[in-house]
C-alpha cells in the first residue's frame, strides 16, 4: 500500500536481510521474484567490509529497494558508503594521517568511527573513536568521519588512511 499510495523513487530498508531463518525483508523480496511483483534482479549477499557486511537490493512493485543491515552502525556505514553518494550529496572522501596505530582484520576492510583534526600546520589527523562493534551506536555520535582500515593492514601512527565525512 505504501508504495502504491506514496509512489517513492526508492525504498531503503534496515535489517531483516541476513541468511537467518526469519529474515522477513529478504524473504518478502525474494518471493516477489514471480507474479505481479516480479523482481528479476533481487540479490542478497555479503560485501567484504566491517561493519555492514550483509547487503541486498531488489525491485518491488517497480520500485528499487536498497536493503541495509540492521545493526545501527552497520546501517550508518552502509548508508554513507553506498546510498548517500547515489541518492544525495555527500562530501568527497579524502586522506589523513592516522593518529594511532591499528591493525586491520583479515579478509575485509574495516570502517572505524573517528574524528578528523585539521591542524594549524596544514596536516589532517584521523583519530579512531571507540571499538569496532556495530552495536556501539553511542560512539558514532562523536564521529565526524569514517576511517577506512584496509583488510589485514598494519598501520602505524602517521599512516595515510582514507576518511569519509559523515
Image (spheres, grey):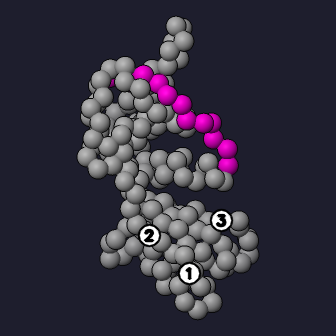
Residue 34 visible in image: yes
Please tell me whether residue 93 belongs to the stretch shown in magenta: yes
Q: In this view, does 145 lie above or below 36?
A: above
Most extreme residue toward the bottom is 35
Q: Residues within 10 Å of mark 2 (few under 14, many from 20)?
A: some
Q: Is mark 1 on a helix, strand or loop?
A: loop
Indicate which disc residue 10 carries.
Answer: 3
What residue is at 56 percent from the left and 81 percent from the top?
A: 40
Q: Residue at x 36, y 40 (%)?
A: 150
Where's the C terminus, which quadrant?
A: top right
Instruction: Characterize the local packing of mark 1: few (<14), some (14-19) or many (20 or more) Cα atoms within 10 angstroms.
Output: few
Residue at the disc numbered 1: 40
**Does the magenta portion include 1?**
no
How far across and how far down the image is residue 65, in percent? 58, 68
For the residue pair 71 and 86, the one nearer the viewer reads as 86
The residues tagged by marks 1 and 3 sit, at their Cα atoms, a distance apart of: 17 Å
* Residue situated in front as seen by the camera: 52 or 5: 52
Separation of marks 3 and 2 at Cα, in angstroms: 17 Å
Q: Where is residue 8 in the image (x, y as percent from the top left)?
A: 71, 67
Say if 60 sits above or below 160 in the image: below
Q: Position of residue 152 (x, y in %)?
A: 27, 41
Mark whose residue sits in front, 3 or 2: 2
How many callouts does the rendering have?
Answer: 3
Distance from disc 1 to disc 2, alpha carbons, whole Å, reads 13 Å
SS class, disc 2: strand
Q: In this view, does 126 lie above or below 79?
A: above
Q: Which residue lies furthest to the top in this view?
A: 121
**Which residues, given as a range, are shown in magenta?**
88-100
- What residue does disc 2 label? 44
Q: Position of residue 70 (x, y in %)?
A: 43, 59
Amino acid at each position: 500500500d505504501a508504495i502504491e499510495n506514496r509512489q517513492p523513487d526508492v525504498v531503503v530498508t534496515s535489517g531483516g536481510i541476513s541468511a537467518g531463518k526469519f529474515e522477513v525483508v529478504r524473504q518478502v523480496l525474494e518471493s516477489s521474484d514471480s507474479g505481479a511483483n516480479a523482481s528479476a534482479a533481487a540479490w542478497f549477499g555479503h560485501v567484504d567490509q566491517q561493519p555492514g557486511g550483509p547487503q541486498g537490493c531488489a525491485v518491488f512493485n517497480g520500485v528499487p529497494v536498497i536493503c541495509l543491515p540492521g545493526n545501527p552502525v552497520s546501517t550508518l556505514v552502509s548508508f554513507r558508503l553506498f546510498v548517500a553518494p547515489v541518492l544525495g550529496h555527500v562530501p568527497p572522501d579524502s586522506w589523513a594521517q592516522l593518529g594511532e596505530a591499528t591493525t586491520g582484520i583479515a579478509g575485509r576492510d574495516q570502517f572505524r568511527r573517528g574524528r578528523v583534526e585539521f591542524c594549524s600546520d596544514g596536516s589532517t589527523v584521523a583519530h579512531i573513536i571507540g571499538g569496532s562493534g556495530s552495536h556501539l551506536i553511542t560512539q558514532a555520535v562523536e564521529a565526524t568521519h569514517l576511517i577506512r582500515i584496509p583488510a589485514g593492514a598494519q598501520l602505524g601512527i602517521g599512516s595515510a588512511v582514507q576518511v569519509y565525512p559523515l
